[in-house]
Image: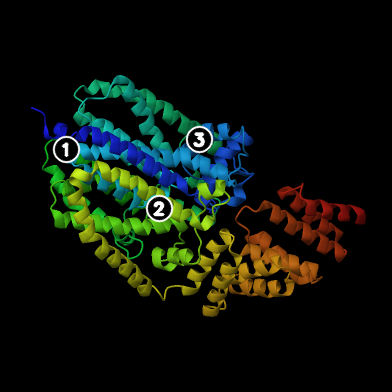
């Protein structure tokens, strides 16, 4: 007799839905361009571009576009795991035949992101659906869980950005999927698995824990233990890539970029423990999991279903070992994240370092849902629908939310959306007749049209899933938005001026100077001594040709915070042009002493200006000393050359 699944042709429908999910997610993940400046993205693409155009591992040519960099023997390098940058080399090489390989080029950034991040993430969505279907034998539950992972967690924004979290997690979960299949992996699959398992660590260091857990799972599932030796050649190949890169860049096989940070606060943070990893802190666990506005369970509350799902999975003899492995990966990943120097991940809407374990966490949720009633299904679907709305807003505006913002949705992303600030998309960029403001509408129309096609294949289970949506969506949406609102109120007194300043930075990065001006001014209304806001208003006044106003802003900036090096430099240049040489010399001198960001050209110019000031006062020996220092930083700079000629003429 035919089985129930065969009678309803569910196996065929599952394969069709898997393909449709790939199409939906690939379109969604690759839709938005990535023009938003981001240090983490820039440093990775700097390495790729440098290897293609400069044939070098250092990123000296582009190092000013990022604060995330290492400094060794007079050269700058990316401080990140090199795996993703190296994997992008074939894409960058192919792109070089028709475009400019430049990390600041929007199209180059998007092509690399699309093939190295968005495409693998879409492949995972397809595979994730199949493994979930093998667990629950329900098309609707499998479909809902896949969409929950893809669109209702931090997986969504980081599938659109050139970070290592998603590609490494894709490799990890595919290896998990291979081990969960009924048939043992072939010899060729084992060889490839060894390489990919080791290379995922080269992409994202914390996934070393995944590799260990998956190896233990393989040893418990594969009957012929000797076949595990087939993993060794691939591991050695990937490890050799890692060791050779470290030796060439940093002079040691196990020396990584984090141990040579150029930015002093980062260097101090990574000097503790093992490259910055110490031990789990309770405060960090609270921040990354429960903190209102930013915590994992706050942004994606449906992930709480993973807890009862884990215990339900333990009662299933067939799935017990994979469930234990998935649970171990989730727990270890959380503990590692709570041990990091910056657990929240810096510029992020949530704990981005947890992205790598999200497929395993959603997988555990399945065991809570496969026999769930309408009420439980309604809770899950409502929470999923609410979170998907939040992450669409985050992804479509700016996923790089400043850490000072405690409620990213209401304090930041909604403000961007209300002012019409959206990430550019490739379709309006190609078809110039389509206004950029319509990009979100085009996106929503396309995705929901594809969802309707999927609904055709889900129609026999439609009553169950539609009832769940009706029960849960409205209440969960209202609940999460209210929680975001109260989170904003709870933290309203925390650095309100700096929050306006952070929003102003985003507007400037998105080429919205008037909106940025309003935010900077609002910051100064709250706190007139806010140094970064004064500094940025000084830069804007200087660009507008209002030199006297710029001088006043720069003076206020250095009075409030004497450590802002570039404020000293800009103030000194303006004072020099007004012939106020003594005060200009003082600020140039301070700049050369406190500049720690690797802006070697500006340091060279500062010494050159100091040389010309000394020359004006007849101090030719001091002038020669300063021009020598300038030449040591950037001998080919125009201002340095101009100062050298003046000194040579005086002698």
Instruction: Identify which residue, 166 or 55, lies in the foreground.
Output: 166
Q: Give whichever of discs 1 and 3 has the lower sequence position.
A: 3
On screen, 562 above or below 445?
Answer: below
Determine the image quadrant of residue 302. Answer: bottom left
Residue, disc 3: 86
Q: Secondary structure at mark 2?
A: helix
Give coordinates of residue 87: x percent, y percent: 48, 34
> Foreground mark, 1 or 2?
2
On screen, 118 above or below 542?
Answer: above
Residue 594 relative to residue 237: left or right: right
Residue 491 relative to residue 425: left or right: left
Q: Are marks 2 and 3 in contact (CB under 8 Å)?
A: no
Neighbor class of circle 1 (other Cα within 10 Å; few <14, some 14-19, many 20+) is: some
Instruction: Identify which residue, 349 or 415, lies in the foreground.
Output: 415
Residue 447 relative to residue 439: left or right: left
Q: How much space separates mark 2 and mark 3, taking CA atoms?
A: 34 Å
On screen, 300 above or below 489?
Answer: above
Query: For the point 73% across and 48% down, which residue is it?
Result: 632
**Placement of the N terminus among the 4 image quadrants:** top left
Residue, disc 2: 444
Residue, disc 1: 319
């Amino acid at each position: 007799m035919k089985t129930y699944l065969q009678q309803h042709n569910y196996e065929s429908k599952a394969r069709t839905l898997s393909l449709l999910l790939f199409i939906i997610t690939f379109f969604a993940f690759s839709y938005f361009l990535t023009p938003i400046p981001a240090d983490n993205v820039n440093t990775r693409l700097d390495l790729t571009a440098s290897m293609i155009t400069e044939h070098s591992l250092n990123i000296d040519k582009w190092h000013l576009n990022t604060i995330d960099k290492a400094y060794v023997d007079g050269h700058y390098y990316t401080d990140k795991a090199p795996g993703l940058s190296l994997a992008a080399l074939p894409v960058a090489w192919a792109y070089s035949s028709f475009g400019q390989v430049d990390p600041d080029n929007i199209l180059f950034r998007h092509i690399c992101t699309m093939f190295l991040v968005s495409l693998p993430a879409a492949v995972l969505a397809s595979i994730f659906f199949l493994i979930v279907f093998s667990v629950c034998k329900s098309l609707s539950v499998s479909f809902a869980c896949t969409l929950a992972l893809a669109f209702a967690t931090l997986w969504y924004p980081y599938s659109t950005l050139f970070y290592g979290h998603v590609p490494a997690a894709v490799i990890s979960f595919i290896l998990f999927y291979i081990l969960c299949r009924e048939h043992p992996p072939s010899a060729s699959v084992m060889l490839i698995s060894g390489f990919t398992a080791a290379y995922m660590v080269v992409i994202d260091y914390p996934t070393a824990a995944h590799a260990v857990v998956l190896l233990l799972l393989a040893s418990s599932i594969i009957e012929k233990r000797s076949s595990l030796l087939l993993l060794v050649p691939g591991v050695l190949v990937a490890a050799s890539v890692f060791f050779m890169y470290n030796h060439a860049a940093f002079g040691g096989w196990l020396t990584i970029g984090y141990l040579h940070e150029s930015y002093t606060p980062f260097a101090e943070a990574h000097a503790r423990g093992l490259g910055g990893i110490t031990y789990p802190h309770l405060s960090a666990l609270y921040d990354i999991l429960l903190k209102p506005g930013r915590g994992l369970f706050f942004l994606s509350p449906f992930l709480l279903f993973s807890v009862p799902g884990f215990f339900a999975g333990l009662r299933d003899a067939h799935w017990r070992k994979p469930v234990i492995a998935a649970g171990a990966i989730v727990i270890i990943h959380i503990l590692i994240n709570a041990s990091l120097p910056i657990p929240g991940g810096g510029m992020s809407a949530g704990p981005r370092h947890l992205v790598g374990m999200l497929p395993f966490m959603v997988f555990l949720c399945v065991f809570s849902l496969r026999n769930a009633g309408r009420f439980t299904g309604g809770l899950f679907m409502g929470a999923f629908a609410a979170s998907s709305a939040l992450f669409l807003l985050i992804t479509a505006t700016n996923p790089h939310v400043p850490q000072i913002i405690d409620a990213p949705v209401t304090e930041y992303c909604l403000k961007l959306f209300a002012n019409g600030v959206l990430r550019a998309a490739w379709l309006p960029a190609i078809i110039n007749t389509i206004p950029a403001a319509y990009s979100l509408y085009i996106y929503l129309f396309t995705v929901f049209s594809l969802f309707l096609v999927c609904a055709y294949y889900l129609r026999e289970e439609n009553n169950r899933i539609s009832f769940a949506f009706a029960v849960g969506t409205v209440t969960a949406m209202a609940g999460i938005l209210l929680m975001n609102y109260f989170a904003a109120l709870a933290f309203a007194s925390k650095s309100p001026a700096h929050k306006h300043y952070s929003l102003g930075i985003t507007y400037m990065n998105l080429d919205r100077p008037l909106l940025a001006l309003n935010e900077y001014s609002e910051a100064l209304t709250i706190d007139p001594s806010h140094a970064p806001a004064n500094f940025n208003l000084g830069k804007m006044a200087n660009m507008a040709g209002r030199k006297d106003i710029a001088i006043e802003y720069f003076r206020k900036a250095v009075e409030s915070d004497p450590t802002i090096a570039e404020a000293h430099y800009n103030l000194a240049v303006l004072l020099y042009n007004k012939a106020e040489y003594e005060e200009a010399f003082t600020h140039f001198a301070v700049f050369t002493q406190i500049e720690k960001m690797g802006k070697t050209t500006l340091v060279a110019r500062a010494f050159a200006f100091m040389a010309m000031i000394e020359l004006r006062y007849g101090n030719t020996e001091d002038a020669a000393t300063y021009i020598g220092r300038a030449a040591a930083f950037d001998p080919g700079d125009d201002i340095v050359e101009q100062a050298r000629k003046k000194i040579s003429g005086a002698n």
